[in-house]
Amino acid sequence: MSVTAAQGFRAAGVTAGLKASGTPDVAVVVNDGPRRAAAAVFTANRVAAAPVLWSRQAVSDGRADAVVLNSGGANAATGTPGFQDAHATAEHAAEALGVSSGDVLVCSTGLIGERLDRERLFAGVAAAAGALSADGGEDAAVAIKTTDTVAKTAQARGEGFIVGGMAKGAGMLAPGMATMLCVITTDADVPAAVLDAALKDAVRTTFNRVDSDGCMSTNDTVILLASGAAGVAPDPEAFAATLHEVCADLSRQLVADAEGAAHDVAVRVHGAQTEDAAEAVARAVTRSNLFKAAIFGQDPNWGRVIAAVGTVPEEVAAFDPYALDVSFNGVQVCRASGVGEDRALVDLSAREVLVEVDLHAGDAEATVWTNDLTHDYVHENSAYST
Amino acid sequence: MSVTAAQGFRAAGVTAGLKASGTPDVAVVVNDGPRRAAAAVFTANRVAAAPVLWSRQAVSDGRADAVVLNSGGANAATGTPGFQDAHATAEHAAEALGVSSGDVLVCSTGLIGERLDRERLFAGVAAAAGALSADGGEDAAVAIKTTDTVAKTAQARGEGFIVGGMAKGAGMLAPGMATMLCVITTDADVPAAVLDAALKDAVRTTFNRVDSDGCMSTNDTVILLASGAAGVAPDPEAFAATLHEVCADLSRQLVADAEGAAHDVAVRVHGAQTEDAAEAVARAVTRSNLFKAAIFGQDPNWGRVIAAVGTVPEEVAAFDPYALDVSFNGVQVCRASGVGEDRALVDLSAREVLVEVDLHAGDAEATVWTNDLTHDYVHENSAYST
């Protein structure tokens, strides 16, 4: 599992003392080649953190030899000194690994608006560089956790190659991505341009369809590294399918571990004219605090679903607002925008909930995942920084 | 105060038994003229409730003689039978009042997806019609409450005329309006076209800048009635200013009574290139659950503010994302998108909070009001219909 499932990668996770909890907080992932192709997708947030600014530039040539990740501080809203910290982190790692700093990507996660402790971070990078191993993927996955209750790793096997990955993220999950750091590796021999296209497409329908709380982070990063160590150059479509599997697995794990959540909710919109329209409608529902609070109360409140659907402008999604069907876990409680089957038939006690909306306007569909709005969500997020 | 502050109006509020609580639930407001000009603004939700469909049509000729309002049921998602209920309600009221049913507007509020009890509603309409009085404004304001803890009324005096009003709404407050019913009356002699323009403009910068929980209702209605009984035909600008005062007062009361809220939060964005840009940025902040939860925790978490600001696309609001200033209650905790004054200087214990964002991109500004995200909000909205 994790980032060392594929051949040609070593990783490590160590405790550098950036987190008050004393748990691991620095990870390094190294691509030993022979190929060192890379692609990445970053947050769409305009207030991007320093490591995002650094890594966006570093990966633009399609090559990366290593990734340094830290929890215990986002290095966001830290100005020029923060950018210098990210740059210096890459230089320290490069020196320890004998590579060029321009081929080292940097990711940070944690609180915004505080400088990282350079001394501890650099010592952690050195320690991780010294602890790299082909079995280090799990340790690396542990070291990037913030409020995550579990480490998140996944892998999938293609014909003659493997795709593996790790991710963190437990809140602030929203399109333009979840607040997440994710590193995916493969031993397939895939050029950077193919990696880039496959990653963008996979992110669009997996991580970007997870909307835990409507909030978009400053640090989101998904990195894909290819070593070519398996000696197999797969068909781009076959590679994309395997990559998609890993991204879908990891994004589902993010939903399952979202801060304070009691339910994982898939909102599937059918019968749209286009996939974009289906996604826009699903997103309107997943953004409704009233809907999310109702799920917490195990209340199949279809009125709140159609009220949310009705906020989507006609130019975004064409449908007859009085022809909507809504089901909760297969029970069609709303038919033609009115009362349907008995809502008492719906059981929302299980963690996973499926809400389906049929727009009766076409054949396209899309699913967006969210969580319920709970007391624990409010508690965790009102007390997080204090 | 309320809808009978202006001359030429009578009102009543009675208990019809639509609410399980046994509190008043039917109100009638009558315009005795001599003028009977009217204008209204309705929800932008495409899944508009039956009374909205009825009233939109009834007011389109610029005349209304009476308004019937009920709590205890929204008559939304009730299909053709629900529309017939709204129509029949207007007919019953018209008969009792000796006016045309096409000049009776209807408003409903309460749960979605349930038919109203016709017998109780019609008996309530008859009782209210029999109880009408020039002192009935307060009773009417009480009868439209749902989860409101207090009745909301306001009035303002122009030169020789009065504008008064009542509103209800305590959750699902969002642009395209708060979930609210609001009736405003004036004894000024103002033609319907002037009423319409003044009302649209006032709503844009008052009710539509209240975003309690990001959710838009199916029933929102603001109605403005002019009797001309004061015999004064004010200058349109003077009338608009007085109307704005009443709308601002009522919308502020909605924020102060939002479901489960512990803080009323004004997000004021300065230094924008346009008012629309300022509003878009303010709205991005007021929509952030993380920001709202932080306010509940009395945490001046400026990182969540700039993370929300950063989600606004450049084509919507041009600004340098690394030049943002953020203040909480006058303490500039974020300067140039980095650490500013000591956050310990911020006191968020009072109910009202002012968050200011300076974009340093121009001279335009806008303020959007919201509430914090609290345990009580989750509790009320997870248990509301069960």
Image (cartoon, coloured by chain):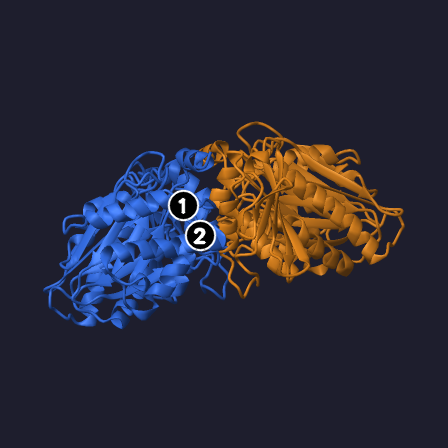
Chain colours: A blue, B orange
Residue at 20% x, 48% y is: A130
As displayed, is residue B346 above or below residue A174? above
User: Relative to the observer, which residue lies in front, A337 or B370?
Assistant: B370
Locate residue A317 relative to residue B165 in the image: left or right: left
- Which residue is disc 1 drawn over? A116
Q: Which mark is residue A82?
A: 2
The reply to whether dot 2 and dot 1 touch (C-beta < 8 Å) is: yes
Chain bearing mark 2: A
SS type, badge 1: loop
User: Relative to the observer, which residue lies in front, A29 or A129?
Assistant: A129
Is the residue marked by circle 2 packed among few (<14), some (14-19), or many (20+) residues within 10 Å?
Answer: many
Residue at 61% x, 33% y is: B351
User: Relative to the observer, which residue lies in front, A377 or B302?
Assistant: B302
Residue A118 location in percent, x, y? Answer: 38, 46
Q: Check disc 1 and give the amino acid type.
A: Leu
Name the image quarter holding residue A41: bottom left
Chain bearing mark 1: A
Residue B68 location in percent, x, y? Answer: 66, 43
SS type, badge 2: helix
**Residue projecting furthest to the top:** B22
Residue A336 makes an appearance in the image: no
Residue B240 location in percent, x, y? Answer: 78, 53
Locate residue A223 relative to residue A137 in the image: left or right: right
Locate residue A103 relative to residue A132 in the image: left or right: right
Residue at 62% x, 61% y is: B361
Residue A338 makes an appearance in the image: yes
Name the image quarter holding residue B23: top right
Q: Which mark is residue B366?
A: none
Residue B121 location in percent, x, y? Answer: 59, 38
N-terminal of the pair, mark 2 or mark 1, is 2
Residue at 59% x, 30% y is: B349
